[in-house]
Image: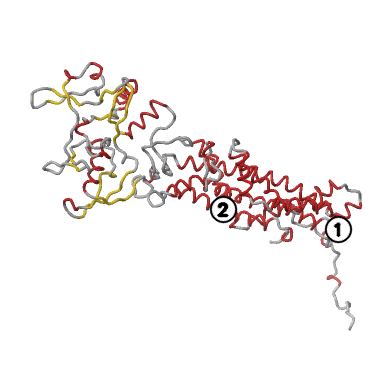
Amino acid sequence: MEKTKYDNIPKEKFQFASVRDLGHDKKLATKPRSYMRDALSRFCKNKGAIVGAFVILFLLLFAIVVPFFTQYTVDYTDSHFVRTLPKNKLFENTSFWDGCESTTVGQQTFTYYYAMGQETGHNAVKNQEYSVEGEGSDALYTFRLDSYHSAGMDYLILSAAEYQAIQAYQLENDVQVIYPTIRVSDRPQAMQDSGNANYYYETTGTSRTQIVYDENGNVIPVYWQDMAEYIDDDYDSLRIEGEDGIAGEDGNTYYYVYARSMSGNNYECRVNYYEYYIFYHSYWLKDGITEPYFLFGTTGTGQDILTCLASGAQFSFLFSICVAVVNLLVGAIYGAIEGYYGGKVDLVMERFSDILSAVPSMIVITLLKLHMGSTGPAIILFIAFFLTGWIGMASTTRMQFYRYKNQEYVLAARTLGAKDRRLIFKHIFPNAIGTLITSCALVIPSMIYSEVNLSYLNIINLSAAGISSVGTLIAAGQEFLSTAPHIALFPSLFLALMMLSFNLFGNGLRDAFNPSLRGSD
C-alpha cells in the first residue's frame, strides 16, 4: 500500500487539539433498576393485568365502603318489600333501573293498581300512565308497575301510643299515613282478599273478588262512616285531626272512622305502608332509614341485596386473604426445609403432604362439622381450607429451592461461610418470591369460589351465624330466576367479575416476576 504523503498538506491545516476534544469513556446515562422496579414496569405494560387490578380494587372498595354507608344492615328484613326491584334515583324518570317492571293485565287487575294511586297519590301504575288494547272486559292494559308502591295499604294493629305518634307525625310533616278504614261487612268476601286493605271500594264475589263499577266506570268507595255521638270518647280521640265531617242524607253529620277498637287497648288501622314505613323508621325507631330505597333490590325475604352483597364480599375477601397468608407462611417454611435439605428429610415430609392432599376436602369439612358442630361455620371453613391449602405453596417453594440451591452464587456463599439460614432467606428464597406471589394471587379467588360453592350448596350455613355470603344470595335467588332475576344477578355478576379480574391480575404477576424476562422491554 502506498504511503500517505503529508508533504502536500499545508502547514496551517495542522492545529493543536484541545484537551476537551479528547474522547473518553462516558458514564451510562441510564440508572440500574431493581428487581421489583423491573417487575412493576413489565406489569404496567400488561393492559389486561392493569384492568384486572382496577376491577379488584373497585370490588375491594365496594366491600369495605358500602357496609359503612348503607342505611340497612344484614339483619334487616321487611315482609312488605320482598323481591322489590332495583331502583336508582338518577333513572327514576326513565324506563331503566326505576324500580318498575312492564306488565300487561286485564281490567280488574289494572283497576286494583290504578285505584291505589287515585286514593293516596302513591302510584302503583307509574305516573298513572298506561296504554289499552281492546274494549270492555276483554281490554288489556300495559303499564309499568312500581314495586315500591304496589304493596299499597295494609291493616295494622297499633297501640294507642303509636297511633298518637302517627297523628303528631302527620300534622308535623303534612302527610297522610292512616286512611279511613272499611267495615268488616264491606270488605271482600273472598277468603284470599278478606284482609286486603287496598279494596276501599265496593266488591262482590265469594270465590273470586270482582270490582263493582258505577255508571261512569269508576270504583265506588265504601269508607266506614259514623256519627260522632255514637263514638265513645277514647275512640273519638283517634280520628284524624281537622276532620270536618260529612253531611248525610238524613241531615246528620258523619265522620270517617280511622280505627277499629281491638282488645288490649289496641286499634286496627288502615295505613299506606310506604308512608308508614317512613314514619316507623325515621320517626318511631330512628334507626337511620329514611325511606324504602334499594339500589340492587331486595331478596325473597326482604333483605337489601346491596348491603348483603357488600357484607358477603367483605367476608369473602377477608377470609380468603387470611387463609392465603397463613397457607403462604406455613407452605413457604415447609417447602423451604424440604427443598433445601432434600434427601431423607424431603422424602419423609413429602410423603406426609401426599397423605394430606389425598384426603378430599369435602370429607374434611364433613368430619369437622360432625365433631365441631358447636363451633362457628367460619372457623370450620378456615380449618378445612388450611389443613390442605398450604400443600400447594409448599410444593411450589420446594421446586424453586431445588432449582436455585445449586447455583454458583449459592455455592460461593456457602464456601465463604454463609450459614443455612442466610442461604435460605438471603440467596434462595428471594428467587421464589415471584412464583409465590403469583400463586397467592390465584389462591385468593380459588378460596372465594370454594367458599361461595359451599355456602351455595348449604354445606356451610354462614347465615346461621349472622354472616352474609355471596353463595347464599345466589342460592336465594335461584327460585326466583323467572320472576325476580335481579336477586341472583348482582351476586353472580360480582363473582364473575372477581374471578375474571383475578385471573388477569395473576397472569400479569406471573409475567412480571418471571426472572427470565428481567430487563426485557
Crowd tier of the residue under label 1, counting other residues whose Cα lies within 10 Å: few below 14, some 14–19, many 20 or above? few
Mark carried by residue 43:
none
Q: Nearer the viewer, mark 2 or mark 1?
A: 2
Extreme residue toward the bottom, this view: 1
Where the N terminus falls, by quadrant?
bottom right
- Looking at the picture, how far across and down is residue 264, in whole percent? 32, 20
Quick one: 510 or 477, which is closer to the camera? 477
* Rendered residue at 18%/37% (across/down): 202
Residue 111 appears in which quarter of the rendering?
top left
Where the C terminus falls, by quadrant?
bottom right
* Rendered residue at 89%/52% (across/down): 414
Q: CA distance from mark 2 to mark 1?
A: 40 Å
Quick one: 462 or 89, which is closer to the camera? 462
Query: Dot 2: what SS?
Result: helix
Residue 509 appears in which quarter of the rendering?
bottom right
Residue under label 1: 408
Q: In the rendered image of this protein, does residue 26 appear above or below residue 290?
A: below
Query: Dot 1: what SS?
Result: helix
Q: Are marks 2 and 1 in contact (CB under 8 Å)?
A: no
Identify residue type, mark 2: Met
Identify residue type, mark 1: Glu
Residue under label 2: 499
Q: In the rendered image of this protein, does residue 283 appear above or below residue 393?
A: above
- Looking at the picture, how far across and down is residue 3, in whole percent? 90, 81
- Looking at the picture, how far across and down is residue 61, in whole percent? 55, 43
- Looking at the picture, how far across and down is residue 206, in whole percent? 21, 40
Quick one: 24 or 16, which is closer to the camera? 24
Going from N to C along the chain, the mark reached first, 2 or 1, is 1
Quick one: 144 or 104, which is closer to the camera? 104
* Rendered residue at 83%/54% (across/down): 342
